[in-house]
Image (cartoon, helix red, strand yellow):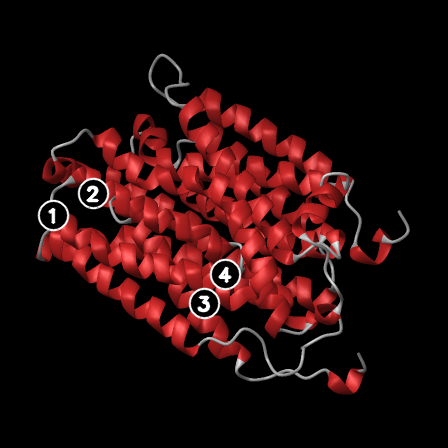
Amino acid sequence: MSETNIQVYGSRWKVLLLFMFINITMQILWITFASITIEAAGFYEVAELDILLLSLVFMIAYIPVTFLASWIIDKYDFRIGAGIGAVLAGIFGFLRFFAGNDYTLVLIFQIGIAIGQPFILNSITRLSANWFPESERTTATGLSMISQFIGIMLGVLITPFIFDAFDIPITILIYGILALISGACFVIFTKNKPPTPPSIEISKEKVLMGQGLKQIFVNRYFIILFVTFFFGLGIFNFITSYIELIVAPRGFDPTEAGILGGLMLIGGIVGCVIMSALSDKYKKRKILLIISIIIATISLSVITFSADPILLYLFSFLLGYGILSAGPVALEYAVDLTEPVPEATSNGLLLMIGQVGGIIFILFFEGFTTPLGDYFPTLLLESIFLLIVLIMVFFLKEKSNLKST
């Protein structure tokens, strides 16, 4: 394809905003019950662990569904793949209201929403490739991931206020209507790709998913990213899930614990914006990943040993900055180093292993504390894991050097 056929369209930002809208909605549906766990347990007349399962099913469902989602995105492209996720979120998100206080029905509908999540998240790098030039690709990926964090924050922060003003059924109805609106907007107004591609790269022929999987797992650089996502997202999911239990022995109340969790997400948003922009401007991946993981490793080490409020607030922000800012850079790096493997395949595998890490860390490290209930042993071990990841990332190579290996 000649350079004259390459064109960038302003409508790319509309497509990105519609995608961010449905992704925000998906995260709100996922995290609905996290900040009203006790109240939800009373309403549905179940144990608090059963309410936790309503969120955990998203991680569990991601593992088998990611392969189907990636295959559909690879075969039928971005709009069909992400559209399936948008439709599932809209339908099952709305149906939750009609379950009343029947926990079993709510769980079934929650699983329906969870099945849709891989179709949306695995489309992130395909959206960037279809619509954005290489000079904006990581920024677009970063903004897609930022919408994920915004959705989590909104779900955690506004749910208690809606619940206090109304009740659980009305809260679920409001989120259900939001899911219908965002899903309909995405399906109606989103286009798959512009009339002409934004870069030469997108016009290159891709291999089939099965062949792509074979190529990926003999790529030692991808394996490093695979391990990075496992530990990075596993540790982040553990800390955000256990934040109150981690800081309670150090004198923090639930409100302060919530602030710490919020600061981590804000740090992640800021980090994604900065690191994605730097990646696009300087065309560097490895050095930015190293910087992010250094920040994360130092931050977690300080959190492990400190009980000082100022230090914990500061380094919670920096921990989110370090771990989450590595995400968009690593996803785009994976696309670079696995060409001609489809974007959804590499994207999906990395996000899937991150979900696996989250499940393992949340379940395995439950109660791994000192006799006084402090999670110091767990945090120390996780700091060591991040240090190991940091050492591994030093063995990566920039895109310009990949063909020489």
- Give the distance between the C-alpha atoms of the residues marked 1 and 4, in whole angstroms: 31 Å
Q: Is residue 277 visible?
A: no
Q: Nearer the viewer, mark 3 or mark 1?
A: 1
Q: What is the tally of numbered marks visible in this picture?
A: 4
Residue that badge 4 annotates: 81
Residue displayed at 42% across by 52% down: 117
Dot 4 or dot 3: first in sequence order is: 3
Residue displayed at 60% across by 55% down: 344
Amino acid on which disc 2 is placed: Leu
Residue 375 — which label?
none
Residue that badge 3 annotates: 19
| 73 up-or-down from 202: above or below | above
Q: Is residue 405 visible?
A: yes
Image quadrant where residue 196 sits: bottom right
| 136 up-or-down from 319: above or below | below
- Give the distance between the C-alpha atoms of the residues marked 3 and 2, in whole angstroms: 28 Å
Amino acid on which disc 1 is placed: Gly
The reply to whether the C-beta atoms of the residues labelled 2 and 1 are less than 8 Å apart is yes
Q: Secondary structure at mark 3?
A: helix
Residue that badge 2 annotates: 105
- Give the distance between the C-alpha atoms of the residues marked 4 and 3, in whole angstroms: 12 Å
Dot 3 or dot 2: first in sequence order is: 3
Q: Quadrant of the N terminus?
A: bottom right
Foreground pick, 339 / 274: 339
Q: Secondary structure at mark 4?
A: helix
Q: Position of residue 45 (x, y in %)?
A: 11, 33
Image quadrant where residue 389 sits: top right
The reply to whether the C-beta atoms of the residues labelled 1 and 4 are less than 8 Å apart is no
